[in-house]
Amino acid sequence: MYSWEIQQLMELRNYLLSVEEYTNICSNSPQINRVSYNAFENNFMISTDDNYSWQFKLKKKEELK
C-alpha cells in the first residue's frame, strides 16, 4: 500500500481501523519505518519514509458497524 492509499483509508474510516485493516497496512506497506502504541491514549502511530504519519485507534470489525 502506498502512503496516499493509507491516507485515504484513514480519512474514510475517520482514523478508526479494524484489526484486519491495520494488519493489511503493516503487511503491504514497505515504506513504513515506525509503528508504535501509546497505552495512555490507547492509540497507534505509523510513520513512513516519505514523511507521512498517522495516529489512529483499532476496533474489532464488529464494533465498527
Image (spheres, helix red, strand yellow):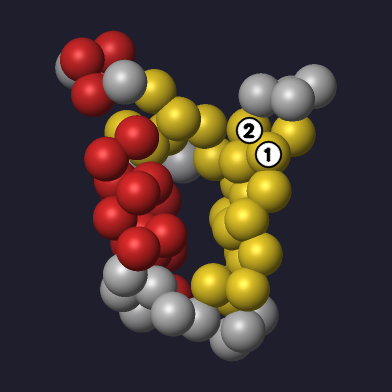
Q: Secondary structure at mark 2?
A: strand
Q: Is residue 37 above or below residue 1?
A: above
Q: Which residue is mark 1?
A: 37
- What's the CA distance linking mark 1 and mark 2? 6 Å
- Residue 6: x percent and y percent? 38, 64
> Could you tell which of marks 1 and 2 lies nearer the N-terminus?
1
Q: Are marks 1 and 2 in contact (CB under 8 Å)?
A: yes
Q: Amino acid at mark 1?
A: Tyr
The answer to whether residue 15 is visible is yes
Q: Secondary structure at mark 1?
A: strand
Circle 1 Cα neighbour tier, 10 Å, few/some/many (<14 / 14–19 / ≥20): some
Q: Amino acid at mark 2?
A: Asn
Residue 53's disc is none
Residue drawn 38% across and 46% down? 22
| Quadrant in the picture for the C terminus | top left
- Residue 58: x percent and y percent? 45, 30
| Quadrant in the picture for the N terminus | bottom left
Left or right of 13 in this view: 7: right
Q: Which residue is mark 2?
A: 43
Residue drawn 63% across and 33% down? 43
Circle 2 Cα neighbour tier, 10 Å, few/some/many (<14 / 14–19 / ≥20): some
